[in-house]
Every structure is written in structure tokens, then in C-alpha cells.
Image (spheres, rainbow, N blue to C red):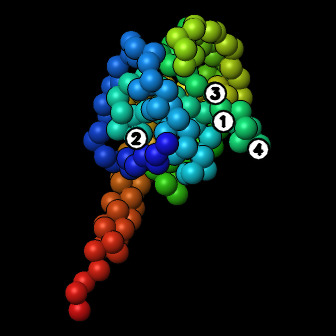
Amino acid sequence: MALLKILHYPDPRLRTIAKPVEHFDDELVKLVADMAETMYDAVGIGLAATQVNVHKQVIVMDLSEDRSDLKVFINPVIQKASDQHVAHQEGCLSVPGVFDEVQRPDLIHVKAQELNGKTFELEAQGLLAVCLQHEMDHLNGKVFVDYLSRLKQGRIKTKLQKAEKLATADSVPPLY
Ligand code: GNR
Ligand code: NI
């Protein structure tokens, strides 16, 4: 297993559209294991492959209190979404330190595949629905800040670019 590097907004690679998984092989098993390790290490509730610069339709998630219920969604598709929307406070491992409200359909019907290729369907509501839509957006090159005002997007970009600069400066200390 290995920890993967999480891309940070506004990295243009977060805009890449993920391709469907075709081969349910050992390479996919390794990717899912590494993504799960990375998600647990970062204390997130979900992670899309896009965020670790792998552009395949793969999502890992664990909404359990004790982090013991790993869920894997390969090639997910929303088959139906309710007209009724609900607001939820969202955060993102690719947008550290930023939390804001996003409106999304309250109830969704999703079809996806398991790690072994088996197809399953589920009806999601509440946090599961929010998280699934947030992760599926990543696979489509979308980040939750895209739903916020241009003013907020600009402020978030500036804040994260400054943080990135500081992090780079810290890792290369001056000689004197
Ligand atoms: O850890 C995460 N928490 C979260 C909270 C509210 C709505 C969505 C999320 S997903 C996020 C992890 C992440 O960035 N996944 O892409
Ligand atoms: Ni995210």
C-alpha cells in the first residue's frame, strides 16, 4: 500500500474527465487500496481517483463513525435525482480549510460496480447522497467551489495559492 498525493484546487488536473474502468484486475485492487489508505490518512469521508491524479471512474468512501465500512464505487451513474434539493455544508480534501453550503438533489438513484465488476444499485439520501454527488463531480472534473459565487471562488484561489507557496518555501529552506 502507498499514500498518494492529493491535488489541490486550482490545479488544472482536477478538471480532467475520468474514463470508465474496463479491467477489474490487480492494478484496480491496488489503486482502491492506496486510495482507501490515502482517504483514511487524510481523515476524509470520500475520495475520487481524480484527486490523486488517476483519471478513472473510481470512488472510495467511509461514512462510519469508527472508519470500518469502506465502500467502493466503480463507474457510478446517477439514474434518477429528486427535484427536491437540500443544502449541506461541504468540504474537500482538494480544497483544504474551506467549507461552504452547496444545494444538491436530496435523493438519488445510483448504479455502480463493485471491485469485482458486479453491478449494484442503491438509493442514497442524506450524507451518502451528498458525498456520492461530490465524488461523482470530481470524476467529471468538477469541484464543489464551482457552485459558489465568483467572488468566493476568487478568494479561495488566492488563499490556496498563498498556502501552496508557503508550503513550497518551507520545504526548501534558504542556505543562510
Ligand atoms: O472528507 C470530506 N468531507 C465532506 C464533507 C461534506 C461533503 C462532502 C465531503 S467529501 C470530503 C472528501 C473529499 O474531498 N472527497 O472528494
Ligand atoms: Ni472532494
The residue drawn where x is 61% and y is 22% is: 105
The residue tagged 2 is 52
As helix, strand or loop, the secondary structure at mark 3 comes to strand
Q: Is residue 106 above or below residue 82?
A: below
Q: Quadrant of the C terminus?
A: bottom left
- Quarter of the rendering containing residue 123: top right
Q: CA distance from mark 4 to mark 2?
A: 24 Å
Query: Residue 165: percent from the left, percent from the top?
Result: 31, 67
Residue placed farthest to the left in the image?
A: 175
Q: Which numbered dot is residue 145?
A: none
Task: Tell me which residue sits at (35%, 38%) in the image.
Answer: 53
- Look at the numbered disc 2 and say if its residue's Cβ is closer than 8 Å to ligand 1: no
The first of marks 2 and 3 along the sequence is 2
Q: Are marks 3 and 1 in contact (CB under 8 Å)?
A: yes
* Residue identifier under label 1: 62
Label 1 CB, ligand 1: below 8 Å?
no
Residue type, label 1 = Asp
Q: Residue furthest bottom?
A: 176
Look at mark 3 in the image and give the residue it sits on.
71
Instruction: Assign a secondary structure to mark 4.
Output: loop
Of the image marks 4 and 2, the number of the one nearer the N terminus: 2
Of the numbered discs 3 and 1, the one sitting upstream in the chain is 1
- 80, above or below 105, in the image: above
N-terminal label among 1 and 2: 2
- x and y percent of residue 8 in the render? 39, 50
Where is residue 28 drawn, in percent x and y?
44, 25
Disc 1 to disc 4, C-alpha distance:
9 Å
95, 3: nearer the viewer: 3
Q: Which residue is mark 4?
A: 66
- Taking 42 as reference, is 69 above or below it? above
